[in-house]
Amino acid sequence: MLIGIVRTIILYLIIVLVLRVMGKRQIGQLQPFELVIILMISELAVIPSQDSGIPLVAGLFPVLILLLLGLAISEIALKSEKARGIICGTPTILINKGQILEGELRKLRYNLSDLLEQLRAKNLPNIADVEYAILETNGQLSVIPKTGKRPVNTQDLKLQVIAEGLPLALIMDGKLQQKNLEKSGVNIQWLNKELTKANVPDIKKVFFASIDSQRKLYIQQKADPNK
């Protein structure tokens, strides 16, 4: 029993490592060959965890082969546009200048109900409002609205805006994030002074605090456990 638990934990950690090596992607962003490899790895990992008679190394050998195969295919697709088109496919236009391309829908076995569902998910329930709809190689639908239906932006209004940098977390659950403090260009004295202004007596009382590119500090104190 104990051996089975240990083998399962080892297999779990190795599979997580394999998936990390393959790259950070959500399931919906996987290419077909990546999804197949992940499914096969998952199936192969179950076999040695269920059968203690199979040596762990022998059970992991096919997993290693699949990992190397996935990395090799990814490298080929990265360096060759032609190979990328064969391996991953190419994006397909389903709506062109407001017109649904019936032939492309039939070719991809993509029915109108699926198309309308995806458009509703993009807050574009009316096909008349769509300039282009493109089915990407990972199965996601990219939608470009017609000019009059696009959200207004600052360029349309001719407004001058200040570029925003990435906010940095300075305090998380009462703990100072020293690296982020150094990146932010402020020091601990400045931070303590700002906390005092906000009537926060101690860093340990802060649940979360972040600073933006304009040196504006956001502070949220920890909840009172007595309430």
Image: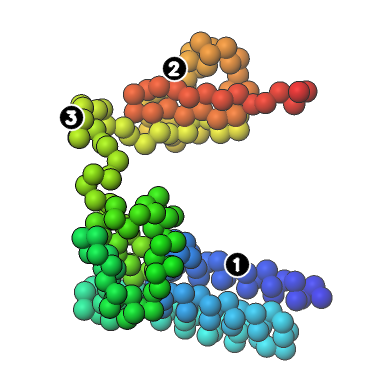
* Mark 3 residue type: Lys
Give neighbour class at mark 1: few <14, some 14-19, many 20+ (Cα, 10 Å).
Answer: few
Mark 2 sits on what residue? 190
The residue drawn where x is 72% and y is 82% is 50
* Mark 1 residue type: Leu
**Number of numbered discs:** 3
Residue 65 image offset from top left, x and y in percent: 47, 83
Q: Quadrant of residue 21?
A: bottom left
Query: Mark 3 or mark 2, which is nearer to you?
Result: 3
Quarter of the C terminus within the rendering:
top right
Kindly indicate whether the residue at mark 1 contacts the one at mark 2 (C-beta within 8 angstroms): no
Mark 3 sits on what residue? 158
Tell me if residue 95 can be seen. yes
First reached walking from the N terminus: tag 3 or tag 1: 1
Q: Looking at this view, name the residue that lies furthest to the left.
A: 158
Label 3 SS: loop
Residue 9 image offset from top left, x and y in percent: 68, 69
Taking 66 as reference, is 8 above or below it?
above
Label 3 to label 1: alpha-carbon separation: 53 Å
Label 1 SS: helix
**Where residue 197 is drawn, which disc sits there?**
none
Label 3 to label 2: alpha-carbon separation: 36 Å
Query: Mark 3 or mark 1, which is nearer to you?
Result: 3
Label 2 to label 1: alpha-carbon separation: 42 Å
Taking 47 as reference, is 96 above or below it?
above
Mark 1 sits on what residue? 13
Residue 58 image offset from top left, x and y in percent: 59, 87
The residue drawn where x is 41% and y is 62% is 116
Label 2 SS: helix
